[in-house]
Amino acid sequence: MKKLGYISLLVLLPMLCFAQQKSGNAAMLHRAQSALTKVIVHDIFSPPVASRIYLYASMAAYEAALPAQKQYVSLSASLHSFPVIPQPVTKTPVNYELASVYAFMKTARRFVFSEAVLDDSLQVLLHKYASIGKPAMEASLAYGQRVADSVIAWSDGDGYKATRKLRRYNLMKDSGKWLPTAPGYMAAVEPHWSKMRTVALDSASECKPLPPPAFSALQSSLFYKQALEVYEVHKTMTAEQKAVALFWDCNPFFLNVQGHLNFATKKLSPGGHWMSIAAIAARKKGADLATSAAAYVLTAVALYDGFISCWEEKYRSNLIRPETYINAYIDEQWRPLLQTPPFPEYTSGHSVISNAAAVVLTHFFGADFQFDDDTETGYGLPMRSFSSFDAAAKEAAISRLYGGIHYRAAVENGQAQGQKIGEKVLQKIKLDGPAKLAAHH
């Protein structure tokens, strides 16, 4: 725990010099998001569960930042079940920048295993804020705690605890159905995730994709041809295609096998990658605390609902992975470039959540927003540059075919599914306040 605490200090120390620059500065929130991502990677949360952590922490940060500005309104204005959190009534001024980050950290702590990491980080943060005075400190933390408590209480009704009690997934041995793959032959991940409460979607099935091509072992069938494409792409892969596949791998389940020794390589989740892109965009744009928090929260909603929608389809179609199909019908020795994740194939989760997030981020920062994505440099991969969020989402989607873990139908239909989810998020959750609406008109 001491080592984890030390790491967390290194993560958060750079943000402290920004803490008092100006009211509404988002530097602290960006650093807090980065700190949370490191904990999520360390604790090896599955992509769907990681999206849930980002969701509630981002909701708390957003709600706690609201009283200091007039540009955005509470989530309760769009989500009828979301709690209305009373604004602070105190003669002592509240530092809403501090309250926002405190609410974020206290909420995040509720959902991770390594609470000590966030606790250590929070203590460093509070120490730096001593100059605002004890009354202001206490008022700010009290409000941040009130917001965190409200969001955590609301999270209790999302169905997560109930899904922990459901029976383990039973494999289907029928032809064309998903089976675990080497090297770990891991059990199905989150087979009941479709039972989670959605946020912007009316139900898990609202953005149901087109069905996958019908399974067939016949060489004349569309299914065989799609599997053959995956096989041929792997054989003729260019250096650029390999770089794309590796950059977007984002597989927290990656297992190293060396003889009898098995150990995990900790990697970013795909949702964590897109939360990082949201931070990159907000920093480049110079977005203030309110806009940064708004971008984070809607990106988190898109990721969270995207995983629910995608996972419902995965366990409905329960489709065989390319690795299993190719080994059975094309080449029994073949292995994909990337390690096949432990859940059914259709649709591609990267395709769904990347396109959903791209729609939201385009709404905030524009359709032609160029950015340099250095998210993976900490994992030994070079930076990649994109002309837009849509371009990044398209690359993330096709990377799964290059990596050998998805057929083209899962990629393309997943993209369409994600696009619809992103649009639903923007239709359902209206964060723009009166001031911004007036400016638009």
Image (cartoon, rainbow, N blue to C red):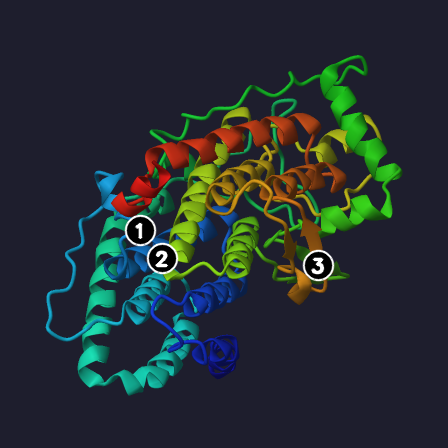
Q: Nearer the viewer, mark 3 or mark 2?
A: 2
Q: Earlier in the sequence, mark 3 or mark 2?
A: 2
Relative to 202, residue 58 above or below: below
Which residue is under mark 1?
Answer: 71
Q: Going by the picture, which residue comes out furthest to the right?
A: 236
Residue at x 37%, y 73% (from the top left corner): 22
Amino acid residing under circle 1: Gln
Rate crowding at label 3 as few (under 14), some (14 to 19) or many (20 or more) other CA atoms within 10 Å.
Answer: few
Percent position (x, y) of residue 28?
Answer: 42, 70
Q: Residue at x 74, y 42 (%)?
A: 403
- Front position among marks 2 and 1: 1
Tag 2 and tag 1, C-beta contact below 8 Å: yes
Quick one: label 1, few (<14), some, or many (20+) residues within 10 Å? some
- Judged left or right of residue 192, residue 271 is right
Q: Is residue 192 visible?
A: no
Q: Amino acid at mark 2?
A: Ala
Contact between labelled residues 3 and 1, with CB atoms less than 8 Å apart: no
Estimate the x, y position of residue 38 in percent, counting from the top left: 52, 66
Query: Distance from label 2 to label 1 (Cα)?
Result: 8 Å
Farthest top residue in view: 220
Q: Report the Cα–Cα distance between label 3 and label 2.
A: 28 Å
> At numbered mark 3, what does the secondary structure look like: helix, strand or loop?
loop
Rendering coords of residue 227 (x, y %)? 76, 27
Pointer 3: what residue? Answer: 383
